[in-house]
Amino acid sequence: MTLTPDTIAALAVSALREEALLTPKPGLVDRNGRGSHPDMTLAMLLDSADSLFDTFADLARAGSEEPVGQSLRNRVGLLGRAGETQMLQTTGGVNTHRGALWTLGLLATAAGAARAETDIFRIAGALAAIPDSAGAPSSSSHGQLAIRTYGVSGAVGEAAAGFPHIRLNALPTLRSSLAWGETVERAQLRALLALVATLDDTCVLHRGGAAGLSWMQASARAVQRAGRFDSALSRFVARVQRRRLSPGGSADLLSGAIFVDTLSLPTTVSAEEHAHADA
């Protein structure tokens, strides 16, 4: 597969659409309904995903044209803010994909330059660790408030660390499930649960506090261990709905995992290939 900017953008949009369509999900919009988001619909999420194609293509192009550094970081920030504006225009002001735009925007930028999957996480992490010259995002956002209140790393910390929850939880679960012969949808649901069980999700913290997060993680682990996966997942979804919780951060990372998996890059490249690329 030739990873042109348009190819990368198409895969990023497809990942967002697959996450939206995945059913049933705990507290999240899916084919069954709005979850814990009365202001969103599935059609809105799909339109929002489609609206970000040009942004992802521009980000991938930027990643292919500039090395990691302040100039590229500033360009990524500018393109990301333009993409967010487009998203909000499409949804009538509803924040459908701000977190996913951060995650997939960094990964798409990295994909523009990557020769192997490990490069994706290395480049994205290095970019995320560079402050945007335009300034930090609003400190009053739900995510920032949760970070300050509960001392968690949040989306920026996850990205700067090279997306460990994608690398170590979501992708291995997704791929092992597929290797066992499970359907793509079942594998993606298992990957989502692997994220919910381990991520200090600021979206859950915002709605449910530390107790809500602890319950969410323990419940996801119980579903992972259950002998009857479908029935256990259905009970979990119903309980999350009653508590009005939403693992939005886990959903964003699931989109990232789906995206990286569909890039189909080699896990590593040889030293000779690296030397050729650096020449």
Image (tube, rainbow, N blue to C red):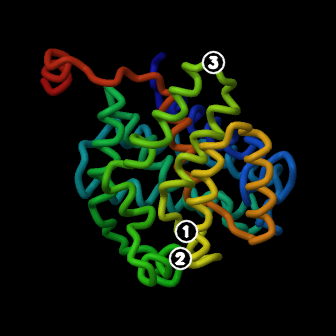
* C-beta proximity under 8 Å, tags 1 and 2: yes
User: To which residue does mark 3 refer?
Assistant: 181
On the image, the x and y values in percent for residue 249 come to 55, 59
Say whether disc 2 or disc 3 marks the residue closer to the N-terminus: 3
On the image, the x and y values in percent for residue 43 come to 83, 50
Which quadrant holds residue 185? top right
Task: Label 3: state its secondary structure.
Answer: loop
Task: Report the amino acid beneath label 1.
Answer: Ser
Q: Does residue 272 appear left or right of residue 98 in this picture? A: left
Task: Label 2: state its secondary structure.
Answer: helix
Q: Which mark is residue 210?
A: 2
Q: Which mark is residue 18?
A: none
Which quadrant holds residue 230? top right
Task: Label 1: state its secondary structure.
Answer: helix
Residue drawn at the location 56% of the way across and 69% of the way down: 213
Residue drawn at the location 36% of the way across and 71% of the way down: 134
Residue 160 seen from this side: yes
Residue 203 seen from this side: no
3D distance between C-alphas at marks 1 and 2? 6 Å
* C-beta proximity under 8 Å, tags 3 and 1: no
User: To which residue does mark 1 refer?
Assistant: 214
Residue 170 drawn above or below residue 216: above
Quadrant where the C terminus lies? top left
3D distance between C-alphas at marks 2 and 3? 36 Å
Residue 271 drawn above or below residue 61: above
Towards the viewer: 5 or 38? 38
Task: Report the amino acid beneath label 3.
Answer: Gly
Tell me the crowding category of disc 2: few under 14, some 14 to 19, or many 20 or more residues within 10 angstroms, Cα based: some
Towards the viewer: 242 or 247? 242
